[in-house]
Each structure stands twice: as structure tokens, then as C-alpha cells.
Image (cartoon, rainbow, N blue to C red):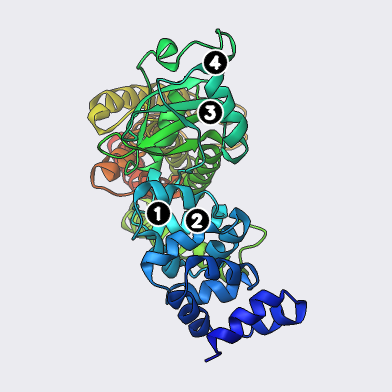
Amino acid sequence: MASFNDIKNLLQHNKLTDFVKLNKLTPRDIAEFTNRHTPQWAVRLFQHLDAKNVAKSFKFIRKNKQQSILNALPEEKAAEILNAMQPDDRTAFLSELPGSAVKELLKVLTPEHRAKTLELLGYAEGSVGRLMTPDYVAIRMSETCRGVLQVIRQRGKASETLNWLFVVDDKGVLIDDINIKDFLVVDPETTVSQIMDNQFIALKVNDPQKEAIKVFRNNSRYALPVTDDNGMLLGIVTLDDVLRLAESEDTREMQKIGGSEALDEPYNTISFVSLIRKRAGWLIILFLGEMLTATAMGHFEGEISKAVVLALFIPLIISSGGNSGSQASSIIIRAMALGEIGFRDWWRVMRREVMSGLVLGLILGIVGFLRVAIWQEFHIQTYGVHWMKVAATVFFSLIGVVIWGTLSGSMLPLILKKLGADPAASSAPFVATLVDVTGLVIYFTVAFLVMQGTLL
């Protein structure tokens, strides 16, 4: 270990060559020197050391000295050291500090390190706590508008946003939020309490991040405060972060609805192997589901052999059911994401979708019936003397399949949500596969009822 006197001598000389020697000190040397001397000597040493070297030694420094040393360092150097620490070391250090000190130190971290630190400090994954920033301006109700503007000039550069200022009491409890324009249109000697209305919207630190999206969507705000269960102001969430979150959530939902796992990174940067892995699983599941279609057709092989004309309309029937189911599924999933409906609305949704399916089925059924009649009339493709029964089969089958498609597509997301699963898992391809199989059963059941005694 280097002599403590040698280190002092190097610090006193202030020569460039001596700084090189200082950076050759081991983390243990740095920690031992810091623990045995006053914080003033540690501050002088740290200013000449590479931040990475200090970060490696920090966990060996006594806890009662760590905060005082960081507070005494220039803000830029303290920021370098904190950002250079390993996440677990930084979290271990911050977890020993009071909340007010943690908030101040979080401000000097890079966004990436701040997010990681908040995660390790205990906020649950997907919670508002992971989304918030401690960069905001807090004021007291006794201050004047002139004083508030002075605070903004002093600390405004470090704030994430100045659109909203947050009023707290002596304990740090949030009691109001005020738009900055309110301070600009009144007499400078007006106190904060005089322009307060004691009405504010706040997010809870343990709320899910989707709740933040919903609150921002329903309120015209650029920033919202984040509090704990006791009302203590912990940070703010800004609109730009929520927009990025909403975009990410929408992207994940769209990818799931499309029948694949959500990609964890942009398409241009994700590896080819990961891209295949994300898509192959769902394709295999959907392929196995479609195999049931072949099984269903095998079950009706006798009917197809007797009335080959039935095979001509199989793609028409099952695609109509799958399309109607995909439509309903996409609409319901989006409505659920926007908070417009929930499981409690299942009866209203079911009634509406059954009626929608009936009307849509009638429209498609009429088109299908006319298609058979016109082709028969102009001899483009003759369906024989029993063409009316073929047309009737197509007509009633389309009504039944479309009703079933809309019903399945609308109910599956609600059921999955009730069971705690992701509604997007009832993706359009999944619904289409389900309706394909059941659509065949409906089609051939209708055909048997209509054509019994003639073609069947």
C-alpha cells in the first residue's frame, strides 16, 4: 500500500506527472486514505483521480463519509463518480441515505443510470416509479411570485420541465400544482397561497405505467407529480416519457395482434435469430390450429364426395368468419387499451357484436346468394338443378359464421383479461384459426339441413 504521506505530498505538488502516479493507486489504497483522513483530503484526492478509480473504491469507504465527500465535490465530479459506479454499489450507497438526499443525487445520474438505479431501489417493474424523474421545481405556499421566479432562475436549468411548479409543505407532502403562466400574470408580491386552488392530479409511485398513459390521455398536462401513499412528492412524469411508453405499448400490442411475440428492440437492430425465434413460436401454434381444419374437413369427407360443389365455397365461408373475428378482436382490444370497456361490459359488448354479426352476415349472405344466382343465370359455372339449395346454404352459412366470428373475436379478449392474461394474445390470427375450424362445422351442418334428401 502506498504511504499516506506520499499521497499527501503528491497532492500538494499539483504536478501533472504526480496525477499519473495518483491514478495508479489501488481501490483499497484510495479507500484507506479516505477513511483515515478528513473529507477535505479525500475531496482533493478525488478531484485528481479518474472517476472509474474512485467508483471502484467507493464501496470500501465508510458510509458516514460517503455522502459528505460527494456533497463537498463539484457537481460535475460527483456526477462522474456516481455514473461510473456499478449499479449494485450505487444502489447500496443510495439505499442508506434519506429520501431527500436520494432525490438530489438521482438528478446527476444519466437517464439510463437513473432508470437502473430506480429499478434496483425497489420500484416494481412496470410501475410509475420506474418512469419518474426527480428533476422538478418545488415551492412553498408562503413564497411570493417574485421569489418563485428567482428560484426558477437559480434551479430551472436542472429541471425536466418548467411548465408546472409543485407546492409542498414542510414535510415534502404535495399540496398543489400550479402552471407557470399563473405566476407571470399577477403582481410579483402575490403569494403562492393566493393563487392556489388545492386541486391537483397526481400519480402513485406504485401505479402501473399504463395508468400514467390513461391519466395523461384524459388530462391536458405536460407533467404530473408522483407521490407515495402518504402524499410525499417523489418526482414527476413528463409527457415525452409517456409518449415513448405509449408508443412502445402500442407497438407491442400490434405485434401481438399480428401473431408474433413483441420485439424487444427495433426491427433494424434485432438479430436474425431473435427475429425468427419471436415469430416461429406463434406460427407453429397457428399451424397446429389450422391442422384442426383439415381434421374437420376429413370428418365431412362423405358430404364433400356427394356434393363436390360444397368444396368450392369452403374458402369463402371460413375466410369471412376469420375476417369478421379479426375485426372484432382488434376493435375490442383497442377499446380495452383505451379504457373504454372492461370485463364488466361483457354483456353489452356481446349483444352489440351479435347484432353486428347478424347485419354483417346478412350483407355477406346476400352477396353470396347473388353470386351463385348470377353465375347460374349466365352459365358461367352451373350449380345444377339444385342451385337454389346451394345458394341458400351459402346464405345461411355466412350469417352463422360471421355471427360466430364477431362473437368469438369480441369475447376472447375480455375472457383472457379476466383470467389475468394479455388480451393481445387473442390475436387476429388466433381468432381466425378458431373460427376457421368452427366455421367448417357450421357450414356443413347448414348444408346437411338444407340439402338433405337432394344432394346429401
Choose the circle earlier in sequence order: 4 or 2: 2
Q: Amino acid at mark 1?
A: Ser
Q: Residue at x 37, y 65 (%)?
A: 64
Q: Residue at x 33, y 46 (%)?
A: 438
Q: Amino acid at mark 2?
A: Asn
Q: Nearer the viewer, residue 258 or 8?
A: 8
Labels 3, 4: front one:
4
Choose the circle earlier in sequence order: 3 or 2: 2
Judged from the image, the secondary structure of the residue bearing numbered disc 1 is helix
> Where, quadrant-wise, is the C terminus in this rendering?
top left
Residue 206 is left or right of residue 47, and the answer is left
Query: What's the distance in space between the residues labelled 3 and 1, CA to CA?
Result: 67 Å
Q: Which residue is mark 3?
A: 222
Contact between marks 4 and 2 (CB within 8 A): the answer is no
Q: Which residue is mark 1?
A: 305
Residue 56 is left or right of residue 440, and the answer is right
Q: Which residue is mark 4?
A: 183
Q: Nearer the viewer, residue 128 or 44?
A: 44
Q: Residue at x 33, y 56 (%)?
A: 122
Judged from the image, the secondary structure of the residue bearing numbered disc 3 is loop
Q: Is residue 72 above or below residue 103?
A: below
Choose the circle earlier in sequence order: 3 or 1: 3
Judged from the image, the secondary structure of the residue bearing numbered disc 2 is helix
Q: Which residue is mark 2?
A: 71
Judged from the image, the secondary structure of the residue bearing numbered disc 4 is helix
Contact between marks 1 and 2 (CB within 8 A): the answer is no
Labels 1, 4: front one:
4
Asked if one can make out residue 229 in the rendered structure from this viewpoint, the answer is: yes
Labels 3, 2: front one:
2
* Residue found at the far bottom of this picture: 1
Choose the circle earlier in sequence order: 3 or 4: 4
Choose the circle earlier in sequence order: 1 or 2: 2
